Structures are given as structure tokens and as C-alpha cells.
Image: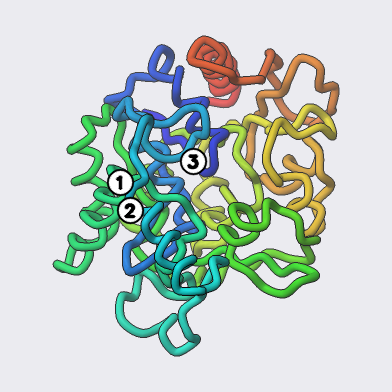
Amino acid sequence: MVTFLAGGTGTPKLLDGAAEVFDPAETTVVANTGDDVELGGHLVCPDVDTVLFSGGGVLDTDRWWGIADDTTETDDELHRLADAAGLDAGPRYLPDEAQTAGRDIARWRRFSGIAEFMEIGDRDRAVHITRTSLLDEGNTLTEVTRTLAAAFGLDVSLLPMTDDPVATLVHTDEGVMHFQEYWVHRRADPTVHDVEFRGADEATITNAVADALSDPVVIGPSNPVTSIGPMLALGGFADALADTPVVAVSPFVEDRVFSGPAADLMEGVGYDPSTAGVAEAYPFADAFVLDEADGTDLGCPVVRTDTRIDGPKDAERVARAVDGALAEVM
């Protein structure tokens, strides 16, 4: 049995070839939900859905977001209506009082659907409508995710990190904004001063997640701050990792990051933007997989390989390195 922690695109790319190394029937994926937003009344879970769509064979792997060849007629019409009515097209947060009213799972991250700032395809939107409706019928996010995973024919077990609301908020020189506004709308342009995981103090991990964390854990090359950070902010999560073998794949080659805003976010919260900084963020990690060009001395078992992942064969190569690192610490 093995458990992967997934957020962003790093770990999902690793999972794209991991089935050749780790039996999917004995693999659990715990996905970050700090990036989730309620957009136009529908709960969107980007990191859950990347794993869902990838495992279902429908992911748009050019963007690593949404469903391949999806249409966008609803999104297009929303923008046409907003333009014709003279409505602002930027992220439109619902009023403060509406952020905590109504659906608990959507707290602190609720946006109007007017001129959506995130492009949602039509088939993609059907997933969000189904998810939200199942939640409104009284199901937990864990139960809903299992239902959707069955619909997409996933071979692995997919779990959200918690059934409770947690929102990743980025404190910048232009104010506090949800991670999706910072990354999708502003393209990580504002300077980061801190990152807050609002709601994490009150959120709890589910029994399913606790069970999954009792197995050896793999942290793929995801963003340590906004992909893995929300999980570590949950009570008991980091403690569980300290009690089980953990292998982490660095998203850096020394001080060069493969993609995304990880370097700016790590610097903003006080970590060195490098492999050494990743090790500092993961004090529970027992071993690391580093790029063969990364000479960082971490003082623990290290397996080196080419860690760039541009397809399933690359992912399988990195997964075999992960398996080798696990063998050294188990």
C-alpha cells in the first residue's frame, strides 16, 4: 500500500506513470482542497479534478486543467452577457456575510459567476454541478469524491484532504487574495508576503485520510506551500507523516524550479526557494528523490534521476526512483 499527496500538476504528472510501479489497487491519492472555490454556486475542486480527469483518461494534458476537447459555450455566454451589461469581468468575491452563510464547504472562497475568471468547460461544469448537488443532498466531500471517481473509472482511491472548508489565501503587496485569483487571474504577479490556510485550525482529517497516512507516503514534485501546505496545516496531518516512511520528490533542481509559482511562494513564507528549502518544509521526510543535476546535500537517503516529467515514460522513471527511495527507509 502507498499514499500519494497531490496538488497542482507535479504529483498528478508523477501518477501518470506510477501505475507501472505501484499497483493502483493498493494506491491512495490524498488531494489538496485549499485551492477549491465556489464559482457561481458550484464547488470547483481543481486539485481533486486533475487527478479525477487524469485517472479517467480525459484530462487536457496541454493545460493540465479541465477536460480535453471540452466546449466552452456557457463560459463564452457568461462573458458576452457581462460585456453587454457593462459588468466588471475580474474576480467578483461575494460579500463578506455571504462567505460564511449557506454551504459550509464553500466558506471563505465564494465568487460570483458573472464573467467567470476561471474558464470552466461545459463537461467540466457538469462535474461541478453534480458534486455540489450531491453535497447539498447531505453527502460529505469524501463520499462525493468516491462517487465521481467511480463514474470516471479510477483505479486508485481518491480522497480529499478533509471534508471541512480550508481556503488558501495569499497575502500580497496588493492585499489578500484567494490563491486562484493570485495564480489564475493575476498570473502570480503580486509580491507574496505570506500565505494563510484559513479554516485549517478548525478542520480535521477524515478517518479515511488517517488510514491512508498510516501507509508509506510519497510527496510528488508539487508546490510545497500551496499544494502540500494546506494538508500540513491540518491538525494531526504532519504528526502522521512523522510516524510513517515518507519520500519526497523535489520540484527544484537546486535553486531552479521546474514550473509554477513555487519559488515566489516559498520565499514569501520564509523558505529558501530551493531543494534545501523543500527539505526544511518537509522535516518529516525520510528520503528524497532529486534530479541528477541537483547536488544538494540533505543528510538523508537520496536517489537521483532525471526528474523532469514530460509524459508517462518520464513519470515511470521517477516513480521507480521513488520506489528505490522507499526501499531504503522501510
Query: What amino acid is labelled 3 in the image?
Result: Leu
Counting residues from the start of the chain, the first of labels 2 and 1 encountered is: 2
Mark 3 vs mark 1: give the one in front.
1
Sequence-wise, the earlier of marks 3 and 2 is 3
Distance Cα–Cα, label 3 vs label 2: 33 Å
Seen at 51% across and 25% down, the residue is 14
Residue 110 lies, in percent from the top left, at 44, 72
Q: Residue type at mark 2?
A: Thr
Q: Which residue is mark 1?
A: 122
Q: State the separation of the CA atoms marked 3 and 1.
A: 28 Å
User: Residue 257: which quarter of the image?
Assistant: top right
Q: Which residue is mark 3?
A: 5
Residue in the picture at 56% in, 13% down:
314
Front-lying residue, 81 or 150: 81
Is residue 48 visible to the viewer in this orientation of the structure?
yes
Q: Residues within 10 Å of mark 2 (few under 14, many from 20)?
A: some
Q: Which element type, helix, strand or loop, lies under badge 1? A: helix
Residue at left 69%, top 14%?
306
Q: Cβ–Cβ below 8 Å for labels 3 and 1?
A: no
